Amino acid sequence: AHRRELLIINLRLRQGVSLKAFTQQHGPLDPIVKTALERLIAEQYLYWDHEHILLTKKGILFYDTIAAELI
């Protein structure tokens, strides 16, 4: 749960979350979180540039919903 909370908090940063750096510091994401991230990207709440995951404009508006999905 702690890793999930860190991920959610870091998503609020302008530069988003570097998945590589995050997993190096905190360990791998569990499959449930990976699946949720993939779905949120497909639904255009998040954007992945193959290094960072960032909130889209739509994602910023629905941040609380995204946070709930990832916790």
Image: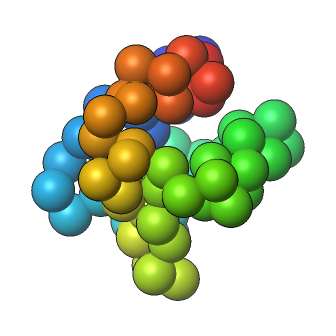
Relative vertical location of residue 30 with respect to residue 19 in this rendering, above or below: above
Q: Nearer the viewer, residue 26 or 15?
A: 15
Residue plotted at (73% across, 50% down):
39
* Residue 4 visible in the shown view: yes
> Could you tell me how many numbered marks the image carries?
0
Up-down: is 49 above or below 47? below
Q: Looking at the image, which residue is at 31% across and 34% down?
A: 61
Q: Identify whether 50 is placed above or below 66.
A: below
Q: How is the image coloured?
A: rainbow
Residue at the limit of the structure toward the left, as seen here: 14
In the rendered view, does 49 fall on the left or right side of 28?
Answer: left
Q: Position of 7 compared to 27: left or right?
A: left
Say if residue 28 shows up in the picture: no
Question: Residue extending furthest bottom?
Answer: 50
Q: Which quarter of the image is occupied by the N terminus?
A: top right
Identify the residue at horizontal 55%, vertical 16% (top origin).
Answer: 68
Q: Is residue 6 left or right of residue 41?
A: left
Q: Residue at x 29, y 53 (%)?
A: 57
Screen quadrant of the C terminus? top right
Q: Where in the figure is residue 46, as x and y percent of width and height?
A: 48, 55
Q: Position of residue 28 (x, y in %)?
A: 67, 50
